[in-house]
Image (tube, helix red, strand yellow):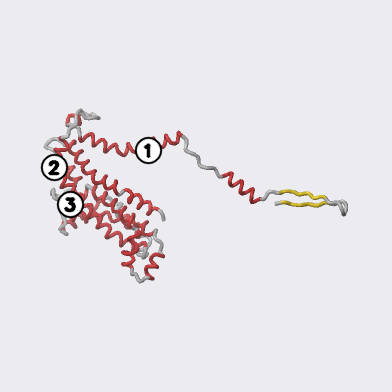
Amino acid sequence: MSLTLRTSDHASDSATVTLVVPDARRRRRRSRTSSISRPGRPSVLVTVVKWVVILVAIVLALLPVLYMVGMSFKSPDDILSTRILPSRLAFENWVGAFENWPILTYLRNSLGAALVAVLVSLVVSIPANYAMARLRAGGKQTLGLIVSAYVAPPIVAIIPLFVLVRTAGLMDSVIGLGIVEGLLLTPVAVWLLDGFFRAIPFEVDEAAQIDGCGPLRTLWAVILPLTAPGIVAVSIIVFILAYNDFLIPLLLTQSIDSQTLPVGIALMQGGREVMFGQMAAASLAGLIPIYLLALFLQKWLVGGLTQGSVK
């Protein structure tokens, strides 16, 4: 912006003075541009510290697994001598675990009960979340009351639970065990699914109603496809919790045909000797399905939980 001043001593003589004033907008633009600095590369120290923290976390996470791997290949003498590394690879622990104990039967029972638990928890939690989040049923305190049911330890309800299961004829049954596990884990499923159902805009329900969809059809055709990543993530979590449970299978199962792997590992004892090597081998055999599940479905798990955390 420029300012022109004219001065004259005579009518015929005139002098022109031009003052150039910088535009305020340009000054603000320059100062704003100069204040923005390009992000540089992190220093070597920051990179080293970051990788050290990551490696420490990985080691701490894998340390129990590595310890079990080492114990599964140790002889009884090496286990009693508390050697870190085995003096020889005792493959007889793996052979004895599968020959002396029905590991495959335990694995089948654990997988079957966990799958039934996932189905039961989803059948109960999906309509419950739809009613609370989309239909606004039950009030604001309903979710807290449901989640509070999972706060109390299961051992508190062992006696009435045992009586109910025996009265219903579900004792010593994989299906009965899965139903009980699913009902006990339903509060967890409801709590995790709440964010997914509330993240969907209500305009979606209104558009479905305009198209003539009722509540059930809206849930099946509209809401479920939108919450599919969350349902998969919750299914994985419920599956892992039911698969690793020990107390409820110990209470409700009595025969090999229905006992799960955690219960079977606890029973792996000889006359006067605890088979630590065989127990470690059986534990690693039970970890394989969970690790494969987490490996192949980690994209769904991480993506689903991330989507549910953003509202």
The residue lying at 48 percent from left, 38 percent from top is 41
Q: How many marks?
A: 3
Which of the two residues, 19 or 31, is positioned nearer the viewer here? Answer: 19
Give the SS element for disc 2.
Answer: loop
Q: Amino acid at mark 1?
A: Ile
The residue lying at 78 percent from left, 49 percent from top is 17
Tell whether 54 sits left or right of 170.
right
Distance between the alpha carbons at the discs numbered 3 and 1: 42 Å
Distance between the alpha carbons at the discs numbered 3 and 2: 20 Å
In the rendered image, which quarter is residue 34 located in?
A: top right
Q: Which residue does the numbered mark 2 point to in the structure image? A: 101
In the rendered image, which quarter is residue 160 located in?
A: bottom left
Q: Is residue 198 depicted above or below 306 in this figure?
A: below
Distance between the alpha carbons at the discs numbered 2 and 1: 39 Å
Tell whether 102 sits left or right of 27.
left
Eye-nearest disc, 3 or 2: 2
Give the SS element for disc 3.
Answer: helix
Q: Which residue does the numbered mark 3 point to in the structure image? A: 252
Crowding near the residue tagged with mark 1, few <14, some 14–19, many ≥20 C-alpha atoms within 10 Å:
few
Tell whether 253 sits left or right of 207.
left
Which of the two residues, 97 or 82, is positioned nearer the viewer here? Answer: 97
Give the SS element for disc 1.
Answer: helix
Q: Which residue does the numbered mark 1 point to in the structure image? A: 54
Residue 304 is tagged as: none
Q: Amino acid at mark 2?
A: Trp
The residue lying at 34 percent from left, 69 percent from top is 213
The answer to whether one can see residue 40 in this image is yes
Q: Give the x, y percent position of residue 188.
A: 30, 54
Crowding near the residue tagged with mark 3, few <14, some 14–19, many ≥20 C-alpha atoms within 10 Å:
many
Residue extending farthest to the right is: 10
Mark closer to the chain start, 2 or 1? 1
Q: Give the x, y percent position of residue 179.
A: 21, 56
